[in-house]
Image (cartoon, rainbow, N blue to C red):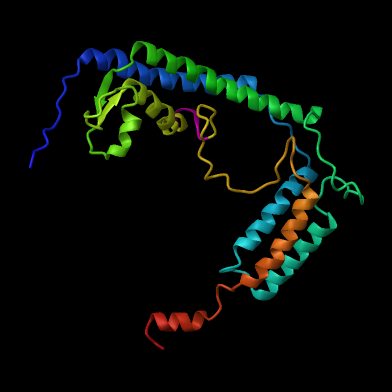
Amino acid sequence: MPVKVEQELYLDPSIRDWVLIPITLIMVLVGILRHYVTQLLVSAPKKQTLAAVREQRALARGAILRTSTPLSPLYPSQYKAFSVSLAAALSSGGYLKEEKPKEGEEDKVQNPFDPANMDGMMDGMKNQAVMMVPNMIIMQYISVFFSGFILIKLPFPLTLGFKSLLSRDIAMPDLDVRWVSALSWYFLNLFGLNGVFKLLLGSDNAAVDTRDMSGNMMPSLPSGPGAPDPSRLFRAEVENLALAEGSYRWACEGVENRVLARFGKV
């Protein structure tokens, strides 16, 4: 049985000093510059009225109430009262910031070229331009000047599935998967510096296009061109609340027996 010989390559220290470290520093500096350029280009968000905020948070209340039904902390009568009152408010249009549409006007679609919606479209285009232009320039620069360069060897083993990620511009099928090429190092920095930017610029930064959204899970109404009618979403939420009552279960139901069974008293 043939014994696999470990590949050992000698990397010139100049590659580390003039390729590896500069690419990392350039990616960090470009991310910081992108953050401040985005702040300069994107207009400040407009202050919303109280009615608009109430409309956006109405669906969130219904979603929170529905997701708590499998083990709800609310007593059955309390849950019923909250569900009925919220469904009645959503049905009557009490949370709508505008008047309830008249009969025959419910199918009205928002104009995507409405001047009120153009600001959001322009901000989105500016963000995409600030993200795409520097990335295209840096990737082309690395592809032209450092194509085929091997920069570093990872100190831990990996499966062959990572070879296309770590050796994108090296046509050597027998090369160990742990060797990282210049172009692959660029992509690793592009998607792996989010934590560094959070330390330097804060969690709410514009340095990367894939932000961590785990801290912003509050549902709200979509806005902008082509957004659905809030009154339709409210009617759908009323139906969802009615369906959720079938899966309601009080968290403290039978808690006495459960506690006694846990301590072996039953």
> Which of the pair 138/263 is nearer the observer?
138
Judge whether 250 appears above or below 211 on screen.
Answer: below
Please state which of residues 48 and 226 is positioned toward the viewer in this rendering. Answer: 226
Quadrant into which the N terminus falls: top left
Q: Specify whether 222 is left or right of 105.
A: left
**Percent x, y for residue 257?**
48, 84
Residue farthest to the bottom, as pictured:
266
Seen in the picture, residue 232 relative to 46 is either above or below; the reply is below
> Which residue corresponds to the image point at 50% horizontal and 39% vertical from the top-left?
212
Q: What number of labels is visible? A: 0
What x and y, as percent, mark residue 98?
A: 85, 45
Q: Is residue 258 magenta?
A: no
Q: Main secondary structure of the magenta part?
A: helix
Residue 202 or 25: which is nearer the viewer?
Answer: 25
The quarter of the rendered structure image containing the C terminus is bottom left
Residue lying at 64% horizontally and 62% vertically, measured from the top left: 66
Measuring 66% from the left and 75% from the top, which residue is drawn there?
Answer: 76
Image quarter for residue 23? top left
Magenta region: 199-203
Residue lying furthest front in this view? Answer: 1
The answer to whether 249 appears left or right of 43 in the picture is left
Q: Quadrant of residue 197?
A: top left
Residue at the extreme right of the image, as rendered: 103
Please report the residue visible at 70 percent of the width from the left and 64 percent of the height from the top.
241
Q: Is residue 106 left or right of residue 155?
A: right
- Residue 79 place in picture, x, y as percent: 68, 69
